């Protein structure tokens, strides 16, 4: 049995929700997923499309002021990206949350506060090794519920699926919700 996530949000004031199995992300993370999806319609599903999307996003995405609440704590600052992991891998092998386990009853999450440009470049190299937490602008935590609030619309990705809500998201863990058979 594995846990899954439930994301509740609004689009144009209308409530919506979507489940995910592996992970959710916002900010830079969701922008890369969005650009990858758009480029695949023109360039096909080539592996290098993700790398191109990553580079495009580095130069065009701008961090946003957000409030992220979890475990009775609140972080309110300019956030570059955040990732909520039920599993440890995302984006075809990236380990944003290297200690995430899909059956432990907790999300592993990381938040990157507004980094300097050189930290972004170093972070891209570290994330593939599962060592992003080595950067001083990265904070990690575990929780079963995470609320994200931004004064403007922000893009989210749920298992790579692009959504753009009104700026408020509630991510909740649904424990032992899905039975997986591993051959």
Image (cartoon, rainbow, N blue to C red):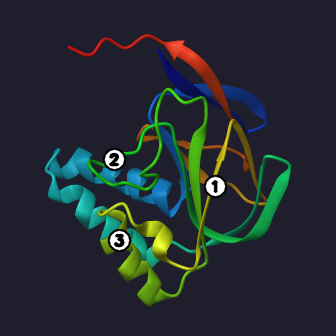
Residue sitting at 78 percent across and 63 percent down? Answer: 75
Q: Earlier in the sequence, mark 3 or mark 2?
A: 2
Label number found at residue 154: 1
Task: Please give the residue where the numbered disc 2 appears in the rendered image.
Answer: 37
| Res 179 → quadrant | top left
The correct choice, above or below, for 179 with respect to 139 in the image is: above
Q: Are marks 1 and 3 in contact (CB under 8 Å)?
A: no
For label 3, the crowd category at 10 Å Cα-Cα, with few meaning under 14, some 14 to 19 and many 20 or more, is: some
Of labels 3 and 2, the one closer to you: 3
How far across and how far down the image is residue 118, in percent?
A: 42, 89
- Circle 2 sits in a helix, a strand or a loop, which is it? helix
Q: Position of residue 109 (x, y in %)?
A: 58, 51
The x and y percentages for residue 18 are 58, 26
Seen from this angle, which residue lies furthest right? Answer: 72
- At label 2, counting other C-alpha atoms closer than 10 Å, the crowd grade (few under 14, some 14-19, many 20 or more) is some
Viewed as shown, does residue 181 lie left or right of 101?
Answer: left
Q: Residue at x 27, y 47 (%)?
A: 92
Tell me residue 131's x, y (percent).
39, 66
**Image marks 2 and 1: residues in contact by CB distance under 8 Å:** no
Q: What residue would you read off at disc 3?
A: 126
Quarter of the rendering occupied by the C terminus: top left
How far apart marks 2 and 1 lie (CA) works out to 17 Å
Q: Residue at x 37, y 56 (%)?
A: 35
């Amino acid at each position: 049995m594995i846990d899954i996530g439930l994301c509740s949000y609004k689009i144009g004031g209308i409530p919506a929700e979507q489940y995910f199995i592996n992970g959710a992300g916002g900010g830079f993370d969701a922008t890369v997923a969005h650009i990858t999806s758009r480029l695949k319609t023109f360039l096909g599903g080539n592996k290098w499309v993700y790398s191109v999307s990553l580079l495009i996003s580095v130069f065009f995405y701008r961090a946003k002021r957000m409030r992220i609440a979890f475990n009775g704590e609140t972080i309110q600052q300019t956030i570059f990206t955040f990732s909520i992991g039920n599993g440890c891998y995302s984006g075809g092998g990236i380990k944003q949350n290297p200690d995430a386990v899909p059956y432990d009853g907790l999300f592993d999450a990381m938040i990157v506060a507004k980094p300097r440009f050189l930290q972004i470049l170093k972070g891209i190299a570290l994330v593939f090794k599962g060592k992003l937490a080595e950067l001083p602008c990265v904070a990690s935590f575990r929780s079963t519920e995470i609320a994200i609030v931004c004064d403007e619309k922000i893009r989210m990705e749920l298992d790579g699926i692009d959504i753009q809500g009104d700026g408020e998201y509630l991510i909740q863990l649904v424990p032992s919700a899905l039975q997986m058979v591993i051959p």
